[in-house]
């Protein structure tokens, strides 16, 4: 374990190594690659939310001048029947408005679009299933006729793809012991990840079956395996080159048209570029699940929770796989509760297949629980932070989802909140305040890193985690700390699937933790080699050499009079001491370390319009160890504003035919600069023992608490609760009018 | 369909391009001239990622037709840094404040923030927030972007 005190590099805020490229427009994102003789691919999308495809006729499109290929699912391996393959191009049925069902490749994007209009499709329109209530009722219209709950052959077809249930203790007894009980239902709408860069890719192929995909993605290795799966190829047939990525938030962990671009390239023998427009991004990618969460919590007069139940239903979209699992696992995670029962339902509806969105599943279920806790605090006349401290999970608490918590920072965050000037300073009568707690598990998974030393001693890191928010800077800082060399001498590069070792996606808040761990270990490998080279030079045993402050030195007590050898000194002579210095590490990281936060929102409400304004927002979060504190704050601030957007405005608005009526940034309104105040941050550091520098992931937790914190602030000001999100002007105004 | 001849000054250099009537200024910059620093986030003028200066007026280049650029002066993100003096203070401050995460909205913010400071070298926070309200950033929550622009303004204001 490395030293945890007196860091030289860690905790500083240097400029990211890829920064100049990004402020000057030089960095290449997904849509920025153009190749000679390249064609442009476009996708035909369903105008119906639910319909049987009776016929697709591509001939008129294929006959158009400038069109090189027009394809449907019939042009893909039919033995592949995965949900993914049927989401990429529909077979038999279209399952949501915007579902892709055909594609063309043409000389220009304009010709490709005109060709789409010439594709003839005959549909038998079916009634769509659009709400959880409709989907879960008996004799519901079925999204998929052969889907059975939990794959149980003996149960009838259903829209409920899966259920889960876990419990501890005896909730009946627990509620009987309670002095007060809160029981409420909460609905959270679908929200889109809203990355500013639409999906984009360029695929090339050669007659030997080799394929290259350039694309914007959180996980090039996941794109490789998913594309291989849909096309029935082996992963070694495919090379994926990740571009710079213009935001993802979980939404760029899956593929939508990369396999289509590959197929079009194979059929035409030319590079094929595909770029979504914003409307396609809204209609056919993401979003997060719409949910219905029913919570019941009971407590003693002193605030001790005696029992809690959660009933959670999550829309999966057209194919199974909502994040109801993590929703269930996180709902009670901040609390030490003896008696609980959690039930979850993964429910199909005729809407786009949901994708991960920052702490997938947690914002919705924890919104419900944190609102219920707030109600409990009201009933008990307790400070909301004191009530949470009374029940807070800490090291040794058995998490509701099974394991015993290692050191975690929830209590530290709550205590920091209580003494924070923003919390201590009372707000005026016109300002409402709401508190909530956030949580995310974080993950480890597989990472690889190589550290190459140039002949001048410069350090080059090669890793496989797309840099979505400054991770190259964190890698360089950890390398600087480990090697003992200046940050400025280090650069970090994100490789493609053939130039770097296997690496799971940038997701699950894992990059700084797991890929960072690989970088540290690869640097330690370099140090071991440097010590060996120094030992050789000095004719000592390697055990007699130390590495201190970026230099090889004889260990104390070794009787030899030599000048220390720096990394640059050793690099200069490496051709004579054994050849290039190359450190490597690959691992499957364990012990990611859960991340907790405490947030509070201060709001005002215009009672004539129902508009809620955020006047102040404070985020306190345990980072384990902040490698680059400015980028940790960036995660906290960005996640906070995404959460505030979800709380206040963002929602998918469907009409009765299942058509999204607000599929643009004009009508799906994400927060803009003038909507927001500064987001005040305090980083707490309870080091994660599973990382040499104590890192725990920080990326996802920040989006969780703002939903309930804002809801609780509105309740504080209005004196009554609006259970459902968003707290948009029409919804708040209607609630105010109803209460009058 | 015959093409339309467009002659414009882009980042101080003359550019002569043949384009089609339906192409946008954004298409002209990205696809015909090869300046891909200007990004398309929405194509409907809602996100500001394609912000450029057209005769010193801030526009969404996705809402301007390419033929309209004929005879005009255009500044894109590629034209903000000076080849002699290096980064513009707005670019430098965005880096120092870690005010970009993914960086795809950054070109639009650079052009818009520079235009603000050219017009008003000492804007208050509210002015900055409203001026930049046409540029969406989904990563940062705007905090560090606003602070970077404030800091840039500070640096540009001559000390008295």
Image (spheres, grey):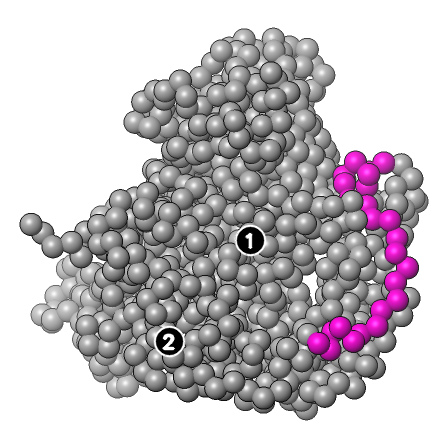
- Residue A454 coordinates in the image, percent (x, y): 29, 78
Q: Residue at x 49, y 76 (%)?
A: B66
Residue A505 lies, with reference to residue A343, above or below; the image says below
- For the residues beneath circles 2 and 1, the answer to whether they share a chain is no
Q: Which residue shows up at 41% across the image and 50% down it?
A: B133
Question: Does residue A696 appear in this view?
Answer: no
B66 sits to left or right of B9:
right
**Residue span colored magenta:** A114-137
Residue A590 located left or right of residue B148:
right
User: Tag 2: Cα neighbours inside 10 Å, few (<14), some, or many (≥20)?
Assistant: some
Quarter location, residue B50: bottom left
Helix, strand or loop status at disc 2: loop
A338 w.r.t. A132: above or below: above
Q: Which residue is mark 1?
A: A665
* Distance of label 2 from label 1 (alpha carbons): 29 Å
Can see residue A179? Answer: yes
Quarter of the image for the C terminus of chain A: give it.
Answer: top right
Residue A37 placement (x, y as % from top left): 58, 89
Residue at the limit of the structure toward the left, as seen here = B160
Dot 1 lies on which element?
loop
In this rendered view, identify the residue nearer to me: B148 or A696: B148
Report crowding for label 1: few under 14, some 14 to 19, many 20 or more residues within 10 A (C-alpha).
Answer: many
Asked whether, in this view, residue A538 is left or right of residue A633, the answer is left
Using the rendered view, name the quadrant where residue A156 is placed. Answer: top right
Q: Read off the chain for label 2.
A: B
Quick check: A133 above or below A446?
above
Per the image, the residue denoted by label 2 is B72
Chain under numbered label 1: A
Residue B51 point in image, percent of width and height: 42, 64
Task: Check if residue A126 falls in the magenta segment.
Answer: yes
């Amino acid at each position: 374990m490395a030293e945890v005190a007196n860091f030289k590099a860690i905790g500083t805020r240097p400029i990211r190594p890829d920064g100049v490229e990004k402020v000057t427009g030089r960095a290449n994102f997904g849509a920025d690659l153009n190749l000679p003789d390249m064609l442009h691919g476009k996708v035909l999308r369903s105008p119906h939310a639910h319909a049987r495809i009776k016929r697709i006729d591509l001939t008129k499109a294929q006959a158009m001048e400038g069109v090189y290929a027009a394809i449907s699912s019939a042009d893909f391996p039919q033995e592949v029947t995965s949900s993914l393959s049927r989401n990429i191009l529909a077979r038999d049925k279209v399952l949501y408005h915007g579902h892709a069902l055909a594609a063309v490749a043409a000389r220009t994007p304009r010709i490709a679009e005109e060709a789409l209009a010439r594709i003839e499709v005959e549909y038998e329109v079916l009634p769509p299933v659009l709400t959880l209530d409709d989907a879960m009722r008996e004799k519901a219209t079925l999204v998929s006729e052969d889907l059975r709950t939990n794959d149980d052959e003996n149960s009838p077809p259903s829209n409920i793809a899966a259920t889960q249930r876990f419990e501890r203790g005896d909730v009946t007894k627990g509620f009987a012991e309670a002095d007060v009980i809160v029981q409420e239902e909460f609905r959270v709408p679908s929200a889109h990840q809203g990355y500013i860069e639409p999906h984009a890719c360029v695929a090339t192929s050669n007659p030997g079956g080799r394929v290259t995909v350039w694309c914007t993605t959180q996980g090039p290795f996941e794109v490789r395996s998913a594309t291989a799966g849909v096309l029935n190829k082996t992963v070694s047939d495919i090379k994926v080159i990740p571009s710079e990525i213009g935001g993802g938030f979980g939404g760029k962990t899956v593929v939508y048209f990369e396999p289509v671009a590959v197929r079009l390239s194979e059929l035409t023998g030319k590079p094929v570029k595909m770029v979504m427009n914003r409307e396609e991004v809204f209609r056919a990618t993401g979003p997060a699940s719409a949910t219905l969460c029913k919570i019941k919590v009971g407590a003693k007069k002193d605030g001790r929770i005696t029992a809690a139940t959660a009933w959670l239903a999550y829309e999966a979209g057209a194919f199974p796989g909502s994040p109801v699992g993590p929703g269930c696992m996180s709902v009670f995670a901040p609390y030490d509760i003896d008696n609980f029962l959690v039930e979850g339902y993964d429910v199909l509806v005729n809407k786009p297949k949901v994708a991960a969105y920052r702490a997938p599943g947690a914002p919705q279920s924890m919104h419900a629980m944190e609102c219920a806790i707030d109600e409990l605090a009201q009933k008990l006349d307790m400070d909301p932070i004191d009530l949470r401290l009374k029940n807070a999970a800490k090291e040794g608490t058995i998490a509701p989802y099974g394991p015993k918590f290692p050191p975690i920072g929830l209590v530290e965050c709550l205590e920091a909140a209580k003494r924070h000037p923003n919390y201590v300073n009372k707000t005026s009568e016109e300002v409402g305040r709401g508190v909530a707690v956030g949580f995310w598990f974080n993950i480890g998974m597989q990472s690889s890193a190589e550290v190459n030393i140039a002949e001048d001693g410069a350090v080059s890191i090669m890793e496989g985690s797309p840099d979505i928010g400054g991770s190259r800077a964190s890698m360089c800082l950890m390398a600087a700390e480990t090697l003992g060399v200046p940050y400025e001498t280090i650069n970090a590069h994100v490789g493609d699937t053939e130039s770097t070792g296997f690496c799971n996606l940038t997701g699950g808040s894992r990059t700084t933790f797991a890929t960072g761990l690989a970088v540290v270990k690869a640097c330690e490998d370099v140090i071991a080699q440097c010590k060996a080279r120094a030992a050789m030079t000095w004719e000592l045993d390697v055990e007699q050499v130390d590495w201190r402050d970026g230099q090889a030195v004889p260990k104390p007590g070794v009787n030899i009079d030599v000048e220390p050898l720096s990394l640059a000194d050793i690099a200069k002579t490496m051709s004579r001491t054994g050849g290039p210095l190359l450190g490597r590490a690959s691992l499957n990281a364990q012990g990611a370390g859960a991340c907790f936060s405490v947030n509070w929102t201060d709001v005002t409400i215009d009672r004539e319009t129902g508009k809620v304004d955020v006047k102040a927002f404070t985020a306190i979060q345990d980072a384990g160890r902040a490698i680059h504190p400015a980028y940790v704050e960036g995660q906290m601030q960005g996640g906070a504003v995404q959460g505030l957007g979800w709380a206040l405005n963002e929602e998918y608005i469907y009409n009765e035919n299942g058509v999204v009526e607000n599929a643009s940034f004009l009508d799906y309104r994400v927060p803009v600069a003038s909507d927001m105040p500064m987001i005040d941050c305090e980083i707490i550091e309870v080091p994660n023992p599973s990382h040499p520098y104590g890192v725990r992931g920080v990326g996802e937790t920040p989006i969780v608490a703002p939903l309930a914190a804002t809801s609780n602030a509105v309740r504080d000001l209005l004196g009554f609760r609006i259970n459902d999100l968003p707290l948009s002007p029409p919804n708040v105004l209607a609630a105010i009018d109803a209460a009058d | 369909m015959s093409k339309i001849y467009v002659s414009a000054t882009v980042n101080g250099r003359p550019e002569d391009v043949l384009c089609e009537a339906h192409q946008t200024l954004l298409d002209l910059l990205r696809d015909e001239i090869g300046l891909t620093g200007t990004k398309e986030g929405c194509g409907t003028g809602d996100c500001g990622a394609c912000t450029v200066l057209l005769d010193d007026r801030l526009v969404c280049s996705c809402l301007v037709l390419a033929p309209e650029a004929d005879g005009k002066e255009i500044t894109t993100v590629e034209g903000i840094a000076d080849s002699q003096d290096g980064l513009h203070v707005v670019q430098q401050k965005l880096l120092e404040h870690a005010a970009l995460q993914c960086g795809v909205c950054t070109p639009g913010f650079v052009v818009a923030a520079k235009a603000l400071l050219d017009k008003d070298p000492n804007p208050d926070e509210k002015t900055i927030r409203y001026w930049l309200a046409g540029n969406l950033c989904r990563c940062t929550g705007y905090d560090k972007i606003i602070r970077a622009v404030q800091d840039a303004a500070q640096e540009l204001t001559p000390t008295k």
